Image (spheres, grey):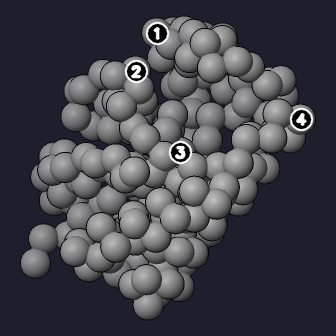
Amino acid sequence: MEKHLILVKHSLPKIVENIPAREWRLSEEGQIRAHRLAERLSCYQPEVIVSSIEPKAQETAEIVARKNNLEFHIVEDLHEHDRSKTSYLSKDEFQASVRIFFENPNVLVFGSETADQCYTRFHQAVHSVLNTHGDKSIVIIAHGTVISLFVSRLTGISDLSLWNELGLPSFVVIDIQSGKLIERENIV
C-alpha cells in the first residue's frame, strides 16, 4: 500500500483581533468542517496524526484522530510563520504582507522569521516525523504559510498561489516515496 504524507491546514478559527493568531481556537463552523475533513481523510487510512503546538491545529488534529481511532502527537516547530509580535491586520494588509514575505524569502519583511528560516524550521520538523514514522501514512496538521513553503520547494509550484488556494481546512497529499503531489482539496 502506498504511504502518504498529508499536510493539513487547520480548520476555520474564531478570529479574535486582540489575541495573537497563534492562540486562536476553532470556531463552531471550524469544528463542523474539521469533522468533514476527518471523514474525507479516512480514505487514506492515516496511521499517525501529528499537530503543531497551536490550539486551532490541535483541535483539528483531535477531531481527525478521534475519527480514525488514533492518538495525536504534538510536535515542536510545525507552527505557523512567527507573527506573534505583529498586530492584527485587515485582510488586504495581511495578504499584501504575505505576498511580500513569499517574494523576498531571505529578507525579514513580516513577522519574526524570513520565509527561508520558516521553511528550514518546518522542513526539519517534517523530516523528523518522517524519520520516526516514514513507513506509515502520516497526517500533519499545521498552517498555510509553512505548508505552502514546504510544498512549493518540494514540487516547484508557486508558494503564493498555493497559499491563496488553501482553505480552512484543506490538505495536500504527497507520495512519501516519490515526493510527488498527488492531490489537494479544500473542505467546506
Mark 4: few/some/many CA within 10 Å (<14, 14-19, 20+):
few
Q: Earlier in the sequence, mark 4 or mark 2?
A: 4
Q: Dividing the picture into quarters, in which one does residue 76 lie?
A: bottom right
Q: Amino acid at mark 1?
A: Glu
Between label 4 and label 1, give the one nearer the viewer. 4
Visible residue check, residue 133: no
**Residue positioned most to the bottom:** 69
Q: CA distance from mark 2 to mark 3?
A: 14 Å
Between label 1 and label 3, give the one nearer the viewer. 3
Name the element at disc 4: loop
**Residue positioned most to the left:** 1
What residue sits 43% from the left and 41% below the top?
Answer: 167
What residue sits 63% from the left and 67% below the top?
Answer: 59
- Residue 3, compared with residue 103, is above or below; it is below
Q: CA distance from mark 4 to mark 1?
A: 28 Å
Q: CA distance from mark 3 to mark 4?
A: 20 Å
Q: Dividing the picture into quarters, in which one does residue 129 lie?
A: bottom left
What residue sits 57% from the left and 56% below the top?
Answer: 30
Q: Which residue is denoted by mark 3 in the rendering?
A: 143
Q: Dividing the picture into quarters, in which one does residue 126 lie?
A: bottom left
